[in-house]
Image: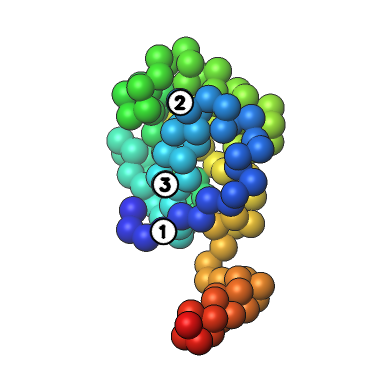
Amino acid sequence: MNGWIKLHRKIEKHWIWQRPDFLRAWIYIIIRCNHETNNVLIGSHLETVERGEFITSISKFSRAIGLSPKQVRNFFTMLENDSMAVIVGESKWTKISVINYDTYQEIGQTKGTERANKGQTKGNRQE
């Protein structure tokens, strides 16, 4: 779990911003997602977890965020209804897959960001 995550300013206009507990849960999901594909051993089963996914359980997620298990299930339903995530529940674990993870957590910088940073650096040097 090393490194940075990207958080777009437009999140302020999103429904998730209106509830601090939901915002915390969403950021927790982004932080926990794999940034590269890995295999995870669950009991005696090897599960492939792709970039933008992670495995947890309702109870573990509930404890980490401070929501009741029912609130977590409702939150997961809201994420699925808004096409933000796909939640696959098994008997002992839950896989969360963030839709458009690569769009918002791309590797490297976009050309526009590079140009903006270069311009900022130049502007700072001139002062």
Work out whether residue 119 can be spotted: yes
Asked whether the beta carbons under mark 2 and mark 3 sit within 8 Å of each other, the answer is: no
The residue where tag 1 is placed is: 4
Q: Is residue 99 above or below residue 122?
A: above
Label 3 residue SS: helix
- Rendered image quadrant of residue 111: bottom right
Residue farthest right in this picture: 82
**Marks 2 and 1 close (CB-CB < 8 Å):** no
Residue 104 percent location from the top left of the image: 59, 55
| 70 up-or-down from 6: above or below | above
**Amino acid residing under circle 3:** Ile
| Distance (Cα) linking label 2 and label 1 | 21 Å
* Secondary structure category for the residue under label 2: helix
Amino acid on which disc 2 is placed? Asp
Q: Is residue 86 visible?
A: no
Looking at the rendered structure, the kind of residue marked 1 is: Trp
Q: CA distance from mark 1 to mark 3?
A: 8 Å
